[in-house]
Amino acid sequence: MSLSFSAIDFETAVSHHACSVGIVAVEDGKIVEEFHQLIQPPFNEYNYYNIRVHGITPHDTYDAPLFSEVFYDLQKRLAHRTVVAHNEGFDRGVLRKSMKDYNIHHSELNTLDKWECTVKIFRALGYKRNNLAACCERHRIELQHHDALSDARACAKLYLLSQGVEI
């Protein structure tokens, strides 16, 4: 079975402003690359409640690159690939709105229009609790929740499971 895709997860500082991204690339059902980058949100501004969720602070991103400086790294890992996220509406929204903030046209990303959403997949499978932590607990997938790379890795593994691939 040839199963290739990229799983993505963003953590946000305020609204849709990313402060961290994790991407896991899968080729032929195997994880082949993991990418993590802290991102300095506009004005390095954070909401206290977001900090409480993920623990990333303005101090952590003081010298981090802006989204526009990270875009090429995202583009080369997502272009022409199926993109998977655990709550794809949120992660796709962060990506699109961030691109708009930096005047990066959506066509520059070159992703397929349809993303896969593991929340929707596991809801359709009848999971009453289908958040990332609950799905990972059920399938004994290691998770450091709200760490963008750990979340992306877990999402990749959940998607593989949903496609019948043993992890």
Image: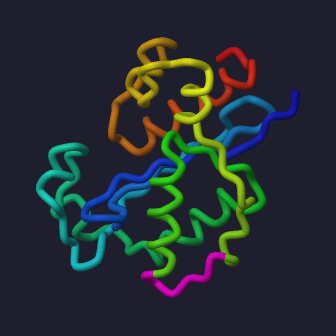
Residue at the far left: name it.
48
Looking at the image, is 157 positioned above or below residue 138? below
**Horizontal and vertical percent for residue 113?**
72, 61
Q: Residue at x 44, y 37 (%)?
A: 151
The structure's colour scheme is: rainbow
Q: Residue at x 73, y 49 (%)?
A: 82
Residue 7 inside the magenta-drawn segment:
no
Q: Which residue shows up at 88% across the image and 27% down it?
A: 1
| Rendered image quadrant of residue 17 | bottom left
User: In this rendering, would 50 be left or right of 119?
Assistant: left
Instruction: Looking at this view, name the residue that lies furthest to the right.
Output: 1
Up the image or down, 163 lies above or below 43; here it is above
Q: Is residue 88 left or right of residue 113?
A: left
Q: Residue at x 33, y 61 (%)?
A: 19
Residue 115 picture location, percent across and down:
66, 50
The residue segment tinted magenta is: 101-106
**Residue 51 at what x, y percent from top left?**
17, 51
Q: Main secondary structure of the magenta part?
A: loop
